[in-house]
Image: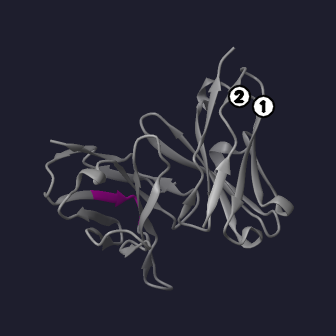
Amino acid sequence: QVKLLQSGAELVKPGASVKLSCKTSGFTFSTSYMSWLKQVPGPSIEWIGWIYAGDGGTNYNQKFKGKATLTVDKSSSTAYMDLSSLTSEDAAVYFCAGGGIPFAYWGQGTLVTVSS
Amino acid sequence: DIVMTQSPSSLAVSAGETVTINCKSSQSLLYSGNQKNYLAWYQQKPGQSPKLLIYWASTRQSGVPDRFIGSGSGTDFTLTISSVQAEDLAIYYCQQYYDTPYTFGAGTKLELK
């Protein structure tokens, strides 16, 4: 059974950074593309980028370059996303998605709130 | 970026009706090398993650009921839900994976009449 378990909700101050995690099981992580997506009320979904767990290669949406950094830890089958210099525009639910493209497997989402 | 335009934005239906959701892309999603359309459909219920329903424009994901039918090619695509059930009330998104950045439509909200 495929599972993607994301870290809990975050309340962060403007200008701060946050690191989200996505622990996976039930599929071969080391040869998977792990994507991250952003959803704001509207509703709309934006693809942030993917990382290939095999070699750490990345492909970012130009809009999120400099904002998001994707990494993986193959030993624990976990994907991470760092979000930097947070503003109110970054408040959203962030999803990880794995198993390839299109996105067959999703995490439950992490709510990021930006507030002082 | 490829722009995905969905219509309508919302749809009120009665149980048992057949509904059609449209999705148009700003450029063709048909790759000539394999004659596949790089178009997917997702269903999202309140408080849940999106669920993949259809890929390659018309292939149902494992476990998806056959009342969900994807069709279309090139730039124009349709998701048809026959005999809508209460459990189908959700927001439906189309998404292109022909080129990065992958992009989604704005969604179609299916509501009960």
Letter of the chain that mark 1 sits on in the rendering: A
Q: Measured along the vertical axis of the image, is residue B76 above or below residue B45?
A: below
In the image, is A84 to the left or to the right of B107? right
Within 10 Å of the Cα at label 2, are there few (<14), some (14-19), or many (20+) other Cα atoms? many
Letter of the chain that mark 2 sits on in the rendering: A
Q: Do the residues labelled 2 and 1 touch (CB within 8 Å)?
A: yes
Q: Residue A95 at what x, y percent from top left?
A: 60, 47
Q: Measured along the vertical axis of the image, is residue A21 above or below residue B35?
A: above
Looking at the rendered structure, the secondary structure element under dot 1 is loop
Q: Residue B71 at what x, y percent from top left?
A: 29, 72
Q: Residue A60 at what x, y percent from top left?
A: 68, 53
Magenta-colored stretch includes residue A109: no
Residue in the picture at 52% in, 41% down: A39
Residue in the picture at 32% in, 69% down: B65
Residue in the picture at 45% in, 53% down: B104
Give the label on residue A17, or none. 1
Residue topped by disc 2: A86
In the figure, residue A85 lies in which quadrant?
top right
- Give the magenta range: B22-27
- Overall secondary structure of the magenta stretch? strand
**In the image, farthest residue toward the bottom:** B34
